[in-house]
Amino acid sequence: MDVDKLDREALVEMYRAMRLIRTFEETAVAYFKQGLVIGNMHMYVGEEAVAVGVCRALTREDYIASTHRCDGHLIAKGADLNGMMAELMGRQGGCCGGRAGKMHQTAPEVGLLSANGIVGASLTLGTGHALYCSMFAPGRVSAAFFGDGGGNQGAFHEALNLAALWKLPVVFVCENNHYAISTSVDTSTALGSFYQRAAGYGIPGLKVNGNDVIQVYQAARKAVDRARRGEGPTLIECDTYRLRGHHEGDEQTYRAKEEVAQVRANNDCVPRMRQLLQEREGWTEEEDQAQLRDIERQVSAAVEFAQNSPPMRAEDMEEHLFAE
């Protein structure tokens, strides 16, 4: 693991971002169980290193295309926690006024034009963002996150083909968490991987440990730099693992409890980063607890903001749907 180009401050910031994502989501789940968070909950727990590593390589002006697991991407890109939590609770102070819920959050101020619940749609949306960049915003880059399930949609091939043909500035990021709902990637995907498909479109493809935020960042940095130079897209497959079910309430009968426990104990990206900081940078328990308390205060403030914001009104449902 090469950390020479990342100083202590950068490593601590990445660790903090990963913990912030996890704390935010675990808090949201607690309120979901109380009936205060509305709609389905598809959590990003276990995959935080991918969002943080990729978004660290991007600027605030760059675009990202997200999925139904958008919390991690939003937070890693710098979205407002207050607006996110209020959105989950269906409040007027939400980033979409309480209309979007978990899967369709929007934060254009940080480059996320909209998350969505259509499997594979982020590939074509991200390609569209890149086309806009090439035409009207040279120097900007798009990153399209998608899961292993999205990698087996026709949109995958359509997006990569067009992006490669036109040398669009897009980085395709496969979050291979090994299960598309309940279908194992081993039983649904030829070769068992996605990065090798890049060769068919004449673009670079590589696979990294998606639980290692440094590996993800280094791969993303090279891909983003390549895109900014006008050399076209890159496909990065991040081998990761979701530690919760496909959605809250998922009984997870398709995988052994021992499998999840083993990953949580041996390859969870958050404690992995903590260990690196301890070994390389002398990160102390006092620093760790102080950081966690600060994160918890920030998330608690977001909850307070959400609860103090009035509920979305039914009579406002059609607002912003039609051009004036």
Image (cartoon, grey):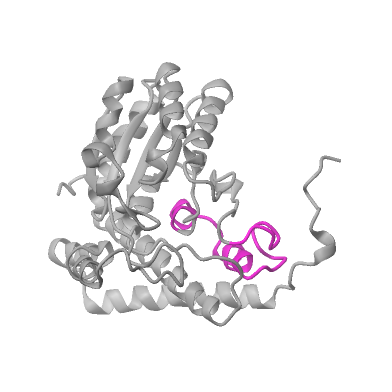
Q: Is residue 79 left or right of residue 152?
A: right
**Magenta segment, which residues?**
72-101
The percent coordinates of residue 283 (x first, y second) are 21, 69
The percent coordinates of residue 23 (x first, y second) are 42, 71
Based on the displayed image, in which of its 4 quarters is residue 85 positioned? Answer: bottom right
Please say whether residue 6 is visible from this viewpoint: no
Please say whether residue 140 is visible from this viewpoint: yes
The percent coordinates of residue 297 (x first, y second) are 48, 77
Rendered residue at 67%/68% (across/down) = 90
Rendered residue at 17%/46% (across/down) = 4
Total numbered labels: 0
User: Which residue sits furthest top?
Assistant: 165
Indicate yes or no whether the magenta region holds residue 90.
Answer: yes
Q: Is residue 39 left or right of residue 57?
A: right
Foreground residue among 147 and 213? 147
Q: Is residue 191 left or right of residue 22?
A: left
Q: Is residue 206 left or right of residue 153?
A: left
Q: Is residue 30 above or below residue 174?
A: below
The percent coordinates of residue 128 (x first, y second) are 54, 30
Rendered residue at 35%/68% (across/down) = 252
